[in-house]
Amino acid sequence: MSSWKDIIRNIAPTLGVALGGPMAGVATKFIADKMLGKKSASEQDIQEFVTNASPEDLVKLKEIDHQFKIDMKNLEIDVYELEYKDRDSARKLFAVNIWPQITLSTVFVLGYFGVLYFLMHGTADPQSLVTNPTMMGVFTTILGVLTAAIPQILNFWFGSSLGSKEKTKGMSEAINKNAVKTA
């Protein structure tokens, strides 16, 4: 099932981008005010409203997205550029010094396979894991936590897809060209 923020991203893209970046508070208050009629509505209130929204409410959400876009333009705020700059700072930090990430990734992956090898072929008695529920719980918990972290490390280094990297590169080039033209 989609989260309420995913629903907003699909129906109201400008508000969706704002919710995922440094303008999240502004977007949340805007949605609360325009959809619920109270600026002080909590994120939980908005979540309940969006997940239970009628088709008419979704049409209204699309309309307030357009109004939000106009209001941000009047304030000379580009939420897409803010989101890009927010993520770009992390990319620049990564470009400066990547050795901590390399070291931690290497240590974790080698440690993971070391633990697996020890548990499968080491001095631990496999029969004791089966007969002792506490040891079995410890084993499965450790193995589960370590295994769950491996895809995160791989996604960090290789990304979710090559297309995503290409899209990011294209967006960066377009913004840089625009910055050169306006300078």
Image (cartoon, rainbow, N blue to C red):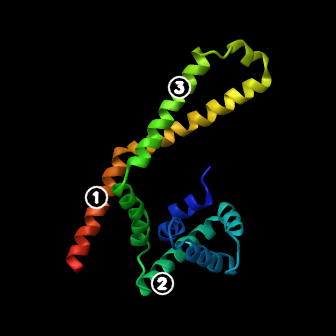
SS class of the residue under badge 3? helix
Q: Position of residue 124 (x, y in %)?
A: 66, 17
Amino acid of disc 3:
Gly
Task: Determine which residue is flagged by label 1.
Answer: 170
- Decide: few, some or many residues near mark 2? Use Cα within 10 Å; few <14, some 14-19, many ≥20: few
Tell me if residue 92 comes above or below residue 136 in the rendering: below
Of 12 and 88, the residue lying toward us: 88
Q: Where is residue 31 in the image (x, y as percent from the top left)?
A: 60, 75
Three-letter residue code for mark 1:
Gly
3 or 2: mark nearer the eye = 3
Q: Which of marks 1 and 2 is in front?
A: 1
Distance from disc 1 to disc 2, alpha carbons, whole Å, reads 28 Å
From the viewer's perspective, tell me whether residue 170 is left or right of residue 149.
left
Above or below: residue 65 compared with residue 136: below
Q: Are marks 1 and 3 in contact (CB under 8 Å)?
A: no
Q: Which residue is drawn at the image coordinates 44% and 73% (left, top)?
A: 79
At which x and y percent is residue 156? Answer: 44, 46
Q: Which of marks 1 and 3 is in front?
A: 3
Q: Residue at x 51, y 68 (%)?
A: 12
